[in-house]
Amino acid sequence: MKTILLTFRKLKKNKTAASLGIAGLVVGLVCVVYIFFWVNDEASYDRFHTNIDRIFVVHAYLEGGTKKIDFRGCPPAVAPALKDEYPEVENTCRYLPGEYFEHLVSFGDKKSILKTAYADVSLFDIFSFPFVYGNKGNPDDPNQIILTQTVAARYFGDTDPVGKIVRFNNTTNLTVAGVVKDIPHNSSIQFDAVVPLQNLVALWGRNDILTTWYNNAFTTFGLLKSPAGFDKIASTITRRIQKEMPESTNFLRAYQFKNGYLYEQNNIRNVKIFSLIGLMVLLAATLNFINLTTARSTKQAKETGLRKSIGATRGNIIKLIYSDVAIICLLAFGAALLIAIAGLPFFNNLIGKQIGLSSLFSVAPLGIFILIYLCTVLLAGSYPAFFLSSFSVSETLRSGFHSVKNKGVLRNSLVITIFVVSIILFTSTLIITKQTLFLQKMDIGFNKEQLIYITLEGKLKERVKTLKEEIKRSPEVTSATATSFLPVVVGNNGEGWEWEGKDPNFKPLVTDWGTDEDMVKTLEARLIEGNYFSNDRQGIVINKAFAEVIGWDSFVGKTLSAYGQSHQIVGVIDNIQYNSLSETCRPMVIQQVGDWATRYLIIRVNTNQFDKTIKSISKICETIEPDFPVQYGFVNDEFAKLTKAEANLKKLVSIFSVFALIVLCLGLLGVVMFLTEQKTKEIGVRKCLGENVSSIVVKLIKPFVVSGLVASAIAIPATWYLMNRWLQNYTNRIDLDGWIFLFSIVISIAIAVATVSWQSWRAATRNPVEALKYE
Amino acid sequence: MIKLSNIDRYYQSKFQRSFVLKAVNLEIQQGEFVSIMGPSGAGKSTLLNIIGLLDEPSAGTYTFLGNDMLSLTEKKKIEYHRNAIGFIFQAFHLIEELTVYENIETPLVYKGVKSKERKAMVADLLDQFNMVAKKDLFPSQLSGGQQQLVAIARAIIGKPMLLLADEPTGNLHSDQGKQIMELLSGLNKEGMTIIQVTHSETNAMYGNRVIRLVDGIIREENVQPAFFIQPN
């Protein structure tokens, strides 16, 4: 109690220095708390499943093309085989993600498009999605549906909907078997509704769809009887497909589900980046705090000396200083936590997460938080405690004692460290921003602006030609094309393309895209050779990447074959970047889209008044197909999703570098205030001797510029190394040029100079008499 | 009580030793009130610090009540600071964030005296020094003389045998100085051994023995019978 009182009295006495130090610490800690929230959220992905340690995933990869290609899923026959052949496996489930299928589900006049997952109902045995109403239903009955709570409420309010019949896709009737609690946001399995996998047979119109050893679309989960069984599966599963089809180059691999989000999808990379940033900012804030608390060390050293002379042991002193620091840090942590919690909605909004406080108040996060606190106290108290208690008593009590002389080096190194952290973060922000912009502005082979798309359902699909004609009549519409996929995400591919002179062991994976004859016109894509196909010019078009793989001089008129059918090439198109911006474009074949595969109508408009255009388009759609609500979107937005990860990273890193810069400014301000106070007398004497103000100001500012330059020398190689590693994930990447570094150094030092100038100017313009009187 | 023989204190630089104290021999009996005088830089404070175990001589021997003081462990030194030796300084060196009461109490806390007992002891002393009304004030709210009174109270609360005063009146004007010196003189009469460093002949007169230090060497010692002391 007494110590707390004493600490508060001390704080009151040194308001400016203390508040700058604490403010810096708070800012740093807020930053750390957010990073902690974020990392904690990432690390919590999928952890809510009670069976988490026993779940594994099997996926396929292709070898035999230009490079190894990973799939998220594997053939549907793998799951039953696993259950039959491995006694370790208790259950399996095949799953087609809800993000892939949007279906109309209606109940009476209530209609909604739901993200619908297709899955074996064992999904609910393996994973922890607790039922609010009903249960997983009868595993052999395909005509059932399971909804999430929010979605069910949309149709049925708060009543128990089990047994109610909904209309699915306007084609089938399904019985509601159960309602599960809403899925936590930190789940990698997301859906609005789940229907039994058997419904795929009707959707895709093929009977063998669930028994084939082809088709890597099925995410395959397995539940082990005990976690120990995983190793056997991982080591023996690889060539399972080859047992059925010895010539296949499709191999299997298993991983533990708990590693899926962080390691398989490489989210651990950002977790590492941000943990590192968090540590750096915390270090900077702590150093800043040490720096400002030791600014008054002359006084503290005297007090220490005196306490020793009246019988305090070194232990007493260290304890005193530590409890002092511990109390201040506790205050700072409390303040930081409050600020962070208050700002959480804003933070969530910014990074597109829904981090709740409940995730924070459990044992592990609190433990880590306390650990961070203890480390901060240990670090922040170490220097004052051991430095101050080391002075000889008689030295400190002599009048005219200054502990400052031997502190110059230390203070400089503290300032430099804070500078280094700021420059690293600031430069990284610039580089990540530049790379993100580069990806966003990259030539993707077509003009993505002013493109609206409609998802085709029901009669819209059947009567797409009529729809297209109707829409093209409106003056705002330039052109339209029906396609199997949007150009940004093309999810259909396969091996099996053959051509003259091809090495039979070389089996590249080729994407298959279907469009009608107006694609080039509508998307403003570019033909390199030949023409696009049309009704009187039948054939296929390949992309430049495929052309390069084949390696001929000219392509038009030559033929490729697939599964015994030959196709004549009518043209070569420049690469349209799809699926990922970070990789080079993969081979693609474009064919006339079949009616059953038509899913989108892409429309080019010549206006930015989208509202009106969409209204008129919707009207046309509704007259043709009144049963389905009109689903539209912008190609531009779909494209933006491809750079979502980078855009998020950019946002986060820029927030954190702003935090670091604030810490830097607060730190520098504290240091310069201390220095000018110390040098008041020197400045007075210099002025009496005729030195002018500007020369004094320059003298005061110079050490900061020097520190900034020294820090740059350390920060540049570090940033270069880190950012180079980050950029290695991108084939399409910017070069790290000197300008970015130069720019960020100039800016950082300019900010520093601006921070210290005012104080320096004030000190230098003070009346010298006043300065000399001061003692 | 105190016996210093052949005490040297020097700083070693590259080519030469610069002596602060050279071959100092000094014996002080219990109950004496000794004034150390001399020009600036003569080594007065250093001598005091050596006696007070805040500094160590470079050579020589020092015994206190017959015990060798130069081979003490850190722990033993702290024991002496807690129980045997009190300090007062020219700059008072009160802890600014502590009240008068807390300043005086601090040595007792280090000594491990129980809270109740501490209260009684501090109250006694405050009473004796006529400072009861000021016990909750902070040092900055007191005059210099009052601050030095607090410092003396703090120095003697542990009932030391030896009180070391480094220019105790140096920062005070003459009236306040006189008050402090009379207080010290009183303490001496009650049996406390006092060694003070001073520039002032007048203040030296309060003691019964003057040691003149010039350039680290004792030049002159005169012992005055107590009845010669006639302040003012």
Image: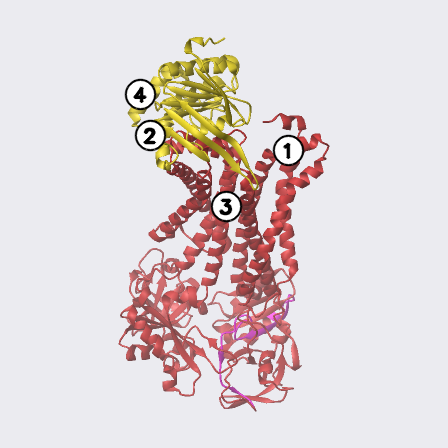
Chain colours: A red, B yellow
- The image shows residue A510, relative to residue A640, as above or below, that is below
Residue marked by disc 4: B120
Give the numbered dot on residue B111.
Answer: 2
What chain letter is assigned to the residue under label 4?
B
- The image shows residue A529, relative to residue A343, as above or below, that is below
Distance between mark 4 and mark 3 Cα atoms: 44 Å
Give the numbered dot on residue A365.
Answer: none
Res A185 visible: no
Magenta residue span: A471-499
Whether pointer 3 and pointer 2 mark residues with C-beta atoms closer than 8 Å, the reply is no
Whether pointer 4 and pointer 3 mark residues with C-beta atoms closer than 8 Å, the reply is no
Look at discs 2 and 4 and give the one toward the viewer. 2
The amino acid type found where label 1 is placed reads Glu
* Residue A25 position in % (x across, y down): 48, 43
* Residue A182 position in % (x across, y down): 37, 59
Q: Nearer the viewer, residue A6 or A707?
A: A707
Q: Nearer the viewer, residue A330 or A695?
A: A695
Lower sequence index among marks 2 and 4: 2
